[in-house]
Image (tube, rainbow, N blue to C red):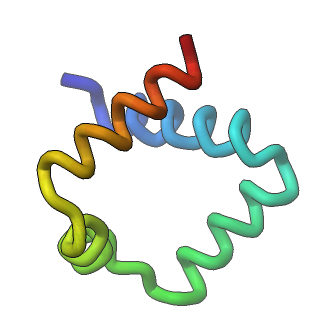
Amino acid sequence: MKTDNEVMNCGFESIFSTLGMVDAERFIMLLKRDKFDYTQWQKKLWQDETLESLSEKAQQAWERFE
């Protein structure tokens, strides 16, 4: 299990490498401004998906990276 600092560093590295410096900063500010609730977001994230549809999307994403 990673420490909190390791998780934060990994998260920042992922965000900055994916979005770039400017959009990553914007993303962080949006989370702070909107008082983002990860738990509530997670509950709603897949509510209209089935296991089969998520599996299909995951397979399609995997194939794009191969």
The residue sitting at 66% across, 66% down in the picture is 27
Pick out the residue farthest to the bottom. 34
Lateral position of residue 15 relative to residue 34, left or right: right
Q: Is residue 4 above or below residue 2?
A: below
Residue 26, quarter of the rendered image: bottom right
The residue sitting at 44% across, 32% down in the picture is 60
Pick out the residue farthest to the top. 66
Lateral position of residue 65 relative to residue 61, left or right: right
Q: Position of residue 47 (x, y in %)?
A: 19, 73
What is the count of numbered marks? 0
Q: Position of residue 10 (x, y in %)?
A: 50, 31
The residue sitting at 73% across, 55% down in the picture is 24
Residue 6, quarter of the rendered image: top left
Closer to the camera, 47 or 63?
Answer: 63
Pick the quarter of the image with the C terminus.
Answer: top right
Pick out the residue farthest to the right. 22
Q: Is residue 44 above or below residue 56?
A: below
The residue sitting at 69% across, 39% down in the picture is 18
Closer to the camera, 49 or 22?
Answer: 49
